[in-house]
Amino acid sequence: MTADGPAQAARAPAACRCRGCDGGATVTACLALTAVLVVTIVIVQFAAVVCARHLAQSAADSAALAAAGALHSGAEAACAQADSVVRRMRMRLRTCSIRDWDVTVTVDGSVALALLGKRSVVAVARAGPVRAGKRS
């Protein structure tokens, strides 16, 4: 044996041990990227639901105000005005109820989610004169 013989023999097992670990960093990086992608998709889906809910609430608020403004023409005309506003905002008027000078509307809409399919969002709004002593 030469002087290099024992040194090469000592290095050989270390090289064999590392050879079995090749690609470990790649697998870890792929798993980390997959986790980041999943978290991003969940955040985007949640944001879509929040946006749809805010749109439904805006439609309900606008419809209630429009109906309250049209109450002088009667209950039918007021609810028709609310329905017109809601349809322009691509929502659906579920209910329109009038009690004295208060108008309450319920609006629903749908949001398409990639992971959970189509979901529904609902919003309720009331409009009418403010009474002294009672605020909503």
Image: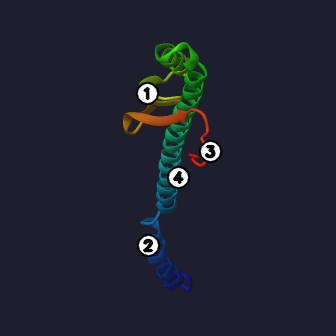
Q: Earlier in the sequence, mark 2 or mark 4?
A: 2
Alpha-carbon span between mark 3 and mark 2:
83 Å
Q: Determine the image quadrant of residue 63.
A: top right
Q: Nearer the viewer, residue 86 or 114?
A: 86
Q: Nearer the viewer, mark 1 or mark 4?
A: 1
Q: Earlier in the sequence, mark 1 or mark 4?
A: 4
Callout 1 amino acid: Ser
Q: Earlier in the sequence, mark 2 or mark 1?
A: 2
Contact (Cβ within 8 Å) of mark 1 with mark 4: no
Callout 4 amino acid: Val
Circle 2 Cα neighbour tier, 10 Å, few/some/many (<14 / 14–19 / ≥20) = few
Callout 2 amino acid: Arg
Q: How many marks?
A: 4
Return the x and y of residue 68 as percentages of the image width and height: 57, 25
Q: Nearer the viewer, residue 78 or 85?
A: 78
Q: Determine the image quadrant of residue 106.
A: top left
Return the x and y of residue 7 as percentages of the image width and height: 53, 83
Mark linked to residue 36: 4
User: Which residue, given by chain and number where applicable, does mark 1 sit on?
Assistant: 97
Return the x and y of residue 53 as percentages of the image width and height: 51, 37
Q: Earlier in the sequence, mark 3 or mark 2?
A: 2
Q: Nearer the viewer, mark 2 or mark 1?
A: 1
Q: Earlier in the sequence, mark 3 or mark 1?
A: 1
Q: Nearer the viewer, mark 3 or mark 2?
A: 3
Q: Nearer the viewer, mark 3 or mark 1?
A: 3
User: Which residue, given by chain and number where applicable, does mark 3 sit on?
Assistant: 132
Q: Nearer the viewer, mark 2 or mark 4?
A: 4
User: Which residue, given by chain and number where applicable, does mark 2 sit on?
Assistant: 17
Alpha-carbon span between mark 1 and mark 4:
47 Å
Contact (Cβ within 8 Å) of mark 3 with mark 1: no
